[in-house]
Amino acid sequence: MQKSTKILISFLICTGLIFTYSLYKGKQEAKERKEDYLAYQEAVKCINEVRDINEAMTTIYKTTEKYKETKGTLINKARGHSILDEYSQVEIIIENLFEVDPNLESDNELNLIYAKSAYEKRNITNSKEAINRINKSELNKEQKIKLDELIKQIG
């Protein structure tokens, strides 16, 4: 066998092995991403249902360390911290969100969470500003109750 043929065969074998390894790693990464996505979705469900919040927050933080942080993950972090009464974290996250996307300043849920957090930290001015940004006609029943309670507390 000629030397050039041996080189070609060796090259083809190496290329085949590299391709097979890349395919294997790609499938492995896709499986891992799917598992992470499902875990994240379960964590969001826990926050929505107000259960297992500490575990849900751990999952969300692990996910954002591994993948890119998005507005959605930040909103879910703020919601989770709010449930845990971690108001300093809530304020930092929501102020960051408002800075990144000023359109979010019209989000009723974020303003309600922010108003409550600001009130709990005795920042009445920020709390009132957030309340004033809330479009009361778009609130659901639960949000209206929370808003009314907060307004009574502020006085």
Image (spheres, rainbow, N blue to C red):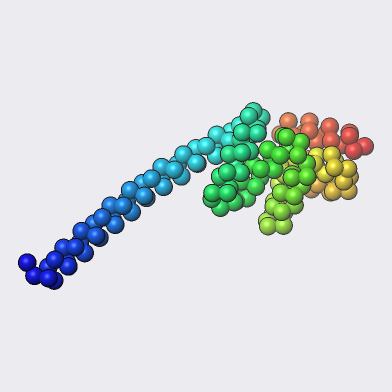
Tell me: 3 left or right of 155: left
Q: Position of residue 79 (x, y in %)?
A: 69, 39
Residue 113 visible in the displayed image: yes
Q: Answer with the quarter of the image where residue 58 lies.
A: top right
Which quadrant: the C terminus? top right
Which quadrant: the N terminus? bottom left
Q: Position of residue 91 (x, y in %)?
A: 77, 47
Tell me: 80 left or right of 30: right
At x 41%, y 47%, the residue is 29
Farthest residue toward the right?
A: 155
Q: How many marks?
A: 0
Residue 114 visible in the displayed image: no
> Which of these two is toward me, 6 or 145?
6
Q: Position of residue 2 (x, y in %)?
A: 8, 70
> Which of these two is toward me, 38 or 29?
29
At x 36%, y 49%, the residue is 25
Tell me: 47 left or right of 37: right
At x 68%, y 57%, the residue is 100
Tell me: 22 left or right of 100: left
Q: Position of residue 63 (x, y in %)?
A: 56, 45
121 vs 98: above or below = above
At x 56%, y 52%, the residue is 68
